[in-house]
Image: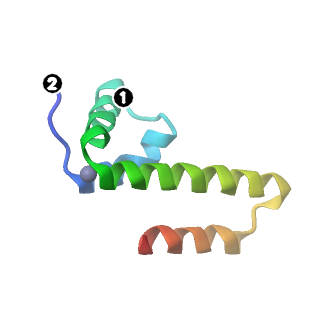
């Protein structure tokens, strides 16, 4: 049983989605939402790229200040 998600719910689950920690049903619901919701799609892409960059930086050494700045960017996005 799937139902349409609201944007807030998508945002809320976005990190788990990117980590593939959601159950298949929820994952599909998010994917489907993003097919029709440009805002959430853009947000997911943004988050994905950001995380890629952070994990790259993390290989060198994860600076706490960077992580905090990243959070700030996300919150103000
Ligand atoms: Zn949305």
**Nearer to the camera, 45 or 71:** 45
Question: Which quarter of the image is occupied by the N terminus?
Answer: top left
Per the image, label 2 sits on a secondary structure element best described as: loop
Q: Position of residue 62 (x, y in %)?
A: 75, 61
Q: What residue do we see at 52% from left, 39% from top?
A: 19
Quadrant of the rendered structure where residue 70 is? bottom right
Q: In this image, 36 relative to 12: left or right?
A: left
Quadrant of the rendered structure where residue 32 is? top left
Q: In this image, 19 relative to 64: left or right?
A: left
- Marks 1,2: beta carbons within 8 A: no
| Colour basis | rainbow
Q: In this image, 41 relative to 47: left or right?
A: left
Q: Position of residue 43 (x, y in %)?
A: 41, 55
**Nearer to the camera, 45 or 13:** 45
Q: What residue do we see at 35% from left, 25% from top?
A: 24
Q: In this image, 57 relative to 38: left or right?
A: right
Q: What residue do we see at 68% from left, 70% from top?
A: 66
Q: Which residue position holds label 2?
A: 1
Report crowding for label 1: few under 14, some 14 to 19, many 20 or more residues within 10 A (C-alpha): few
Choose the circle earlier in sequence order: 1 or 2. Answer: 2
Question: Which quarter of the image is occupied by the C terminus?
Answer: bottom left
Q: Position of residue 54 (x, y in %)?
A: 67, 57
Q: What residue do we see at 49% from left, 41% from top?
A: 18
Residue positioned most to the right: 60
Label 2 within 8 A of ligand 1 by Cβ: no
Q: Which residue position holds label 1?
A: 23
Per the image, label 1 sits on a secondary structure element best described as: loop
Q: How far apart are marks 1 and 2 (CA)?
A: 13 Å
């Amino acid at each position: 049983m799937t139902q349409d998600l609201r944007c807030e719910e998508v945002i809320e689950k976005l990190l788990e989605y990117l980590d593939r920690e959601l159950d298949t049903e929820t994952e599909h619901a998010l994917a489907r939402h993003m097919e029709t919701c440009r805002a959430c799609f853009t947000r997911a892409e943004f988050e994905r790229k950001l995380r890629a960059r952070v994990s790259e930086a993390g290989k060198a050494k994860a600076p706490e200040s960077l992580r905090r700045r990243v959070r700030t960017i996300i919150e103000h996005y």
